[in-house]
Image (tube, coloured by chain):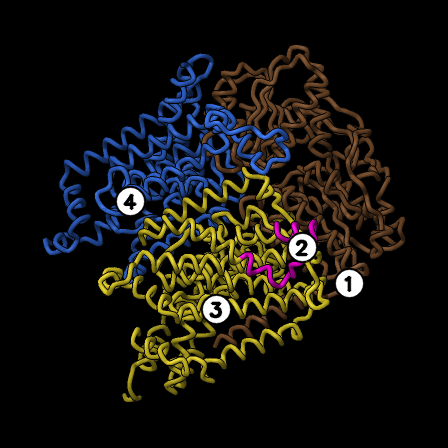
Chain colours: A brown, B blue, C yellow
Amino acid sequence: MKKLVKLMSATMLATAVGAFSAAADTVKIAFIDPLSGPFATTGSNGLAEYKFAAEELVNKQGGVLGGQEFEIVAFDNKMSGKESLINVQVAIDQGIKFIAQGNSSGIAHAITDAVDKHNRRNPDNRVLFLNYSAVDPALTNDKCNFWHFRFDANADIKMDALTDVMAQNKELGKVYLIGQDYSFGKAVAAAAVRDLSSKRPDIEIVGNELHPIGKVKDFTPYARKIVSSGADAVITGNWGSDMVGLGKAIIEAGFEGPIYTYYAASNGITRTFGEAGKGSIYLVGEGFQNPPASDRMSKYVEEFNAKYPDHDISQARITNVVEMLARAIDEAGSATDVVKIAYALEGMEHDSLWGGKVFMRPDDHQAIQNVHVGVHTDEDMKHPLDNSPYGIYSTSMVEMASANSPTSCKMKRP
Amino acid sequence: MELIAINIIDGLVTGLLLFMLSSGLTLIFSMMGVLNFAHASFYMLGAYFAYQISMYIGFWPGLVIAPLAVGIGGALVERYGLRRVHQYGHVPELIFTFGLALLIEEVVQFFWGKNQMAYEEPEILQFAAFAIGGNSVPAYKVFMIFVSVGIFMGLLYVLTKTRVGMVIQAALSYPRTVEALGHNVPLVFMGVFGVGTALAGVAGVIAGPVLGTFPGMAVLLGSIVFVTIVIGGLGSLWGALIASLLIGWLTTFAASYNVEFESILLFFGLEKPEIMSESALRDIWTMTLPQIGPILPYILMILILVFRPYGLFGKRDV
Amino acid sequence: MTQTAHSRSSTAATMFSVASVLPWLLAALLLLALPTVFPSNSALTIMNQMAITIVFALAYNMLLGQGGMLSFGHAVYMGVGGFMCVHIMNYVEVNEAPVPLPLLPIFGGLFGLGLASIVGSFSTRKAGTVFAMISLGVGELIAACSIIIVAFFGGEEGISGDRTYMMPFFEVEFFTQIEVYYLTAFWLLLAAFLMYLFSRTPIGRMANAVRDNPERAEFLGYSARWVRYYSFCASGFFCGIAGALFAINFEILTEENLNLATSGSILLITFLGGIGVFFCPIVGAIVFTLLQTVLSLETELWQLYLGALFLATVMFFPDGLSGVLMRHANIVQRGRPQILVSPYTKMAIPALVTVLASAGLCEVLFHGRHAATGEHSMVLYWITIDTHSLLPWVVLIGCALGGFGLCKRIAPDVLEAWDEASRPGGVNP
């Protein structure tokens, strides 16, 4: 009976795995991110952005290599490292050469490690890892490898840009740092201390603490501490419900200064902050939509929102991933020789849809681009988020942020 | 000093909120002998229902309708789910509620999606009631305190002073005798389950705007509710109250004071490693109290279970 | 029950009779043959994952099924075993210690055993809710530590190693997935066999007695506490082996391996398969892994279906999926499956239609709510349909309701046939 069950499941396995092998001459990109579970919002948002970008920016422009279209194949990794590795394996088996992932640096570490091992063990069937969102600096420093490309500005670069902007505010005297207790939260705090003390030694850091990630029910006690410390500004790398909880608690406790964040927009966060967050929530990032960089950009955003009203372009760099990959494939003259494609991506300069340039630094495969600091507001809002009147308006911009920043990456090229 | 005062108030709010959940859970446990793992899911349903109602007719009707709807839902779950599983024993019952919790989370995501909902306090309560040393206390939190205290009073009155309460108390200890006296014990069970889940629903309605209405809200609170009733002693209403307040204050104060482990370890005469980044124990040296605040209740629970398995106020083994 | 077991274990000869060895031989042959049927790397990875889950579920069932102890934090024993194995891998890589990879699970098991013997010393003093709650607390504690204590657990990105740097084992360096598969399959068989043997030892038998009636066991002169403690330690050992296999397969361990979600899912897996008999959890592990890896590629709603399947199992088949299969096996043994054939075929079609139509309804509803504007067409069961036209709705709702109505009408016949088929004694009207 046990065998019968095994046999039955085995047949199911065969049909399920076999069903993928249908081949067409499209260039497939495996999109591996959470599509179910508590983190699915960011995942499904990213998937919509990828699909739209592939359709509008590549397929409608005639594809690559004279007619091959891009196809996004979605895999649900359930925000689990183990599932992601299985997904990578399934994707490789389907002959997919490009793996895109972004949510959670922890999973990015697992994938970059697995891709590196796979490429070392299977030199005739290599793949590339296009990291569009995981911002742990280590990925392009100690843990870098030739197969990994990061299109987002990493946590250090963003902090560098943010502190450049903060340093110009002469009234700023005391800053409070708070973040989630894991590698990214720690990286943000360390970068903030380093950058602030070198750029504005007179700024006092009145608090620097970490809270358990995803476990805090009520952020009020933290907010009380922040208010009592007399801080003028708060910096946090929090995301998801930890961001909303912290932000709301701080504002409710009577704090009036700016709250500088990495991820306080979209996915319901903008709508939840609403009026309360106006003028106090700030955001550092790339590809801001207000004010629009060009008519082409506005049109792209409007068409996206018309097609996906429940989603926002919250990860603008996805267009860069798709466009730059298409260019690299054309330059390499092959959609399968990933070594050639990787060499074409290295050092590529690209005119971003969001204005400015993107430069893929060859030393560490870190994209260098303009980084903005924006404020949560409803004034002059051309492209609001979350179907609310609110959105992010860019208040300052650092051109080609951290272009000359050092890296500890020792790239081994094949 | 001011921080202590404000922390006492914040801890009270958290504790009373926890009490609204744990009171229902402890009632259900003492009556049916089953730990309802889906209890926090009913809390989540309360918040989502109230959000949906507040979209159409405002916050205040939601405060009444949503818990009623949750309570009816809970009663139906008891009638058509739990009662069926009851015959197989306690473990399947417990596992049934475990599965129910998963299913409710999925259903909520199915209908409302995965985003945080913009469920907000009523505008009439959106002001700062008072401030202590620059820290303002929103009027809504004062309102939360009054609602929870009111519910505790009402519950105590019903259980100890009314006829229904007497029957419930009797059915708790001697279900067969009560049945022999002509009372419909299954109906009492269903009623208690409904009321317990409705209490969780109330907690969801009033906590949703403050703690956020999102699919993870049940998981976030789920296991801590168990910890509360285990510490308080299973089946004890007073125990649930004391333990809730204890945990409320414990977590609030732990989050508020950056006590560093370095000073504690130095106090015990340990030597600080010279090169911190090389030491295997570096994480313990750099640990602070807020980092471990949320796991303190679990440590407390383990200690209590090891040394006093019936909890603070319980009369029998959990 | 106890008596038959006693007579069976007392005579060593029956233990190694052909009948008792045969299933193991067949299982070994099956495990050997599977890669020829599914040679792709992803299928091998999924089968490895299945094997790991089976070991873990069997080890978990040593507590839940055989010892009657409900643990809410069992992932930590597997996790800690796995973490230690990755550390050993890295140690071997740096110091070139002569440790071949196939021996790694022994180390994993020993570390699982070590942790279990510490935790068990205070958690197994009582059974029931006390044990369950302590396991919950310890699970939460260690999962939280894994984020705080970065030096050992590596924070949220976990720690990774490279299995190929271990000492080659007869020239095999475990570069390819197929080599890893055979290693995993070997350990699966060995671990399952050892666990089976454990359940036949006096201590394994006493675990059953303590589960059912601890007082009586105490009166017979056994300490219920120590029996629980030994079962707990043994379970920890095999969980550690599962952890080591995980480390070998995925070469990375993260906080996810320790957290409550993983602990909860192993409870679901074990219960889904059934907790009554030693082999039951295997079915749960296979079904769950398939749902998780294969169904999730097909639909975003897989967790909804999983939850529904699980609830239905608890409500209608409390002895799990394999319990259902085993009852049928009984009927087949009695030579009376023919009674069931006609009502089952009558039932099968409406039941299948109801389930598929309900699932289809969920999919269409979900698509309608969450798809892109203007994207009205979706593929459902290989048919492209328009979600904004009335027809698919009418068809699906009609099928679901109609099927359900038919099922309800046929159900009494099926139950009657079932009663007749499973009635002890001969077939008589």
Do the residues marked 3 and 2 share a common chain? Answer: yes
Do the residues marked 4 and 3 share a common chain? Answer: no
- Which residue is tagged 4? B309
Q: Position of residue A66 (x, y in %)?
A: 88, 54
Q: Residues within 10 Å of mark 4 (few under 14, many from 20)?
A: many
- Which residue is tagged 1? A24
The residue marked by circle 2 belongs to what chain? C
Quadrant in which the N terminus of chain B appears: top left
Q: Residues within 10 Å of mark 1 (few under 14, many from 20)?
A: few
Q: Tell me the distance, in whole angstroms, between the alpha carbons under discs 4 and 3.
A: 34 Å
Q: Residues within 10 Å of mark 3 (few under 14, many from 20)?
A: few
- Which residue is tagged 3? C194
Give the camera-side residue of C6 and C415: C6
Please tell me whether residue C421 is drawn above or below residue B104 in the rendered image: below
Q: Tell me the distance, in whole angstroms, between the alpha carbons under discs 2 and 4.
A: 47 Å
Q: Position of residue A201 (x, y in %)?
A: 68, 14
Amino acid tagged 1: Ala
Q: Tell me the distance, in whole angstroms, between the alpha carbons under discs 4 and 1.
A: 64 Å
Give the camera-side residue of C41 and B202: C41
Specify the segment rendered in magenta.
C87-108
Tell me, yes or no, whether the two marked residues, 4 and 3, touch with CB atoms within 8 Å: no
Do the residues marked 1 and 2 share a common chain? Answer: no
Tell me, yes or no, whether the two marked residues, 1 and 2, touch with CB atoms within 8 Å: no
Q: Tell me the distance, in whole angstroms, between the alpha carbons under discs 1 and 3.
A: 48 Å
Q: Tell me the distance, in whole angstroms, between the alpha carbons under discs 3 and 2.
A: 28 Å
Please tell me whether residue A187 is drawn above or below residue A256 in the rendered image: below
Q: Position of residue C74 (x, y in %)?
A: 45, 53
